[in-house]
Image (cartoon, grey):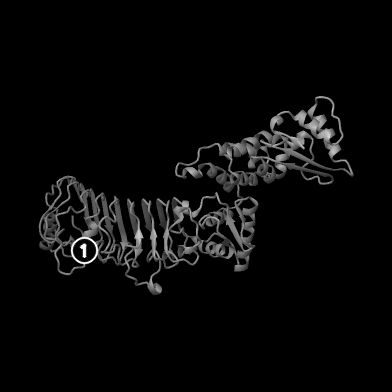
Amino acid sequence: MVTVSQQQKNIKKIQDEISEGVGLTLKGDDLLQRGDRLRSRLKQKGSSVLVILDDVWEVVDLKRLGIPSGSDHSYQCKVALTTRDQNVCVIMEKAGNSADDPSLTEVAKEVAKECKGLPLAVVTVAGALKPKTKPSWDDALVELRKAAPKNIPRVLEEVYQPLKLSYNHLESDEARYVFLLCSLFEEDSDIWTEELLKYGMGLGIFSELENLERARNRVSNLLETLKNCFLLSKGSDKKYVKMHDNNIPFSKLEMLEVLACHRLRHLFSVSLACPDDEEEGISRRTHTRRGVIKFPNLYCLELRGLQCFTHFCSDAVEGIEFPVLRAMHFLGLREFQNFWPRANDAITDSTPLFNEKVSCPNLEVLQIDGANNNITALCSHQLPTAYFSKLKTLKVWGSGKLRNLMSPSVARGLLNLRTLSIKECQSMEEVITEEERQGEEIMTNEPLIPLLKKLLLDDLPKLGHFILTKQALEFPFLKEVEIFNCPEMKTFVQQGSVSTPSLKIVNDDDVVKVDDLNEWIHQRFISKEDDGCESEVTIE
């Protein structure tokens, strides 16, 4: 046994101690010649030798020392290392024969150093570089030294770059897609290979597959590739795999964009979602639990061009929470119905998209475009007034069954809304509707959308007014109004005035002076009737 810690740089002294243990005396100062003699002795026929290198703190160049290694197994010499730095062990084990190349010694040390003491990082990087030569290791070192992205939480910064490097070294896009799919599952849970097959087929990950059996074989092969690169580990049995503990788990997901997956119907199942007590450090499986699911770190969500997409979650749940979500874009979702299926999964389900069971308290941008006829109600009338208090931009286009946007109580909570854009909603009769208390006039002294700067109403053939009230309204910061293709819009409010002291542009005209928006709209409508232009669909 040789204690290495105090003399790792002194190759000659380590050689002397090993040779002394096998009855060999090494002379001279030429380290290569000394190493060759020691190697010959350790490989001597009929000799069984165990070399113990104790307290190792850096990667050891076994070839330079004279210890046989690599693919030549015609000798009875074994090497055991003890170390308090796990990086040393894993980099030598996982890199395989690459670590035996003397030209890689220094760069391997630097690579291990850049892995910041994280065993997972060392394992994944070593696995990715296992068959590579020195130029690949040099390039990897440069990549590892690049700064980690700002959007990755601090605790994950140091593991992100090594994982990214391993991910980029995968040889096919299919392998990358399967790895990303696995990363959506709950941390350290068994991932059923058949479930990956189902989601992979739905997402269109696999190309040129003739039948289900070929797809199953493809998944198996891709998972073996990911395990060989140490991006995945074995599950509880051969039907399952696992993500490593330090991979970015679903609960750490910050940005999610899903684009043009034409066969995708759902995005998550309960088994993929994060339980509501995840932030307490308790990780429970939710395969059968129908509770509130949470996306604790998701700040941006964009779903675009998903032709068959019907629900965000495939399972009926009690609620869904987006505590830090800032932007939500639902674009071109022709079959989208709601966040999760309701009773009997009825297409005619009238449950509002946003209700007391959907929480997004920090939402700033909401854009819905191309929902066709499946969203029948946007906001529940029972929503708390402060529900959309952080919202700055609201755009609703192409929702053919929406008859209104929200109630006055919800509208009064839009304290930060700057832009309101409504377009191509063929059934919309009013933007802000009456409360459910029938016949009660909408009266309040509270301001309505006080910071609104831009208003667009376009292609709303049934729109009669913006809000049904006799109260005078004021929009002190409203600067731009565009109202096109609204043939039934006779007034902005039922009676009373609408003051817009900051208004500068009306229908792209920056010359016209409008003091009372309600009177301006009414006069334009009367003018169209007097001119015999009832068929005219544009207020100009």
- For the C terminus, the quadrant is bottom left
Count the labels in the image.
Answer: 1
Residue 380 in picture, x, y percent from top left: 28, 64
User: Residue at 10% of width from left, 62% of height from top?
Assistant: 530
| Spot occupied by residue 151 in the image (x, y as percentages of width and height) | 45, 44
Secondary structure of the residue carrying tag 1 is loop
| Residue 225 screen position, x and y as percent | 64, 54
For disc 1, the marked residue is 433
- Of all residues, the one furthest to the right in this rendering is 46
Q: Can residue 169 be seen in the rendering of this structure? A: yes
- Name the kind of residue labelled 1 in the image: Thr
- Could you say where residue 250 lies in the image, as x and y percent from the top left? 49, 54
Q: Residue at x 76, y 35 (%)?
A: 2
Crowdedness near tag 1: few (<14), some (14–19) or many (≥20) residues, C-alpha within 10 Å: many
Q: Residue placed at 47% from the left, 51% from the top?
A: 252
**What quarter of the picture does the N terminus occupy?**
top right
Front position in the image: 87 or 259: 87
Q: Quadrant of residue 145?
A: top right
Q: Residue reaching furthest top? A: 29
Is residue 336 shown above or below 68? below
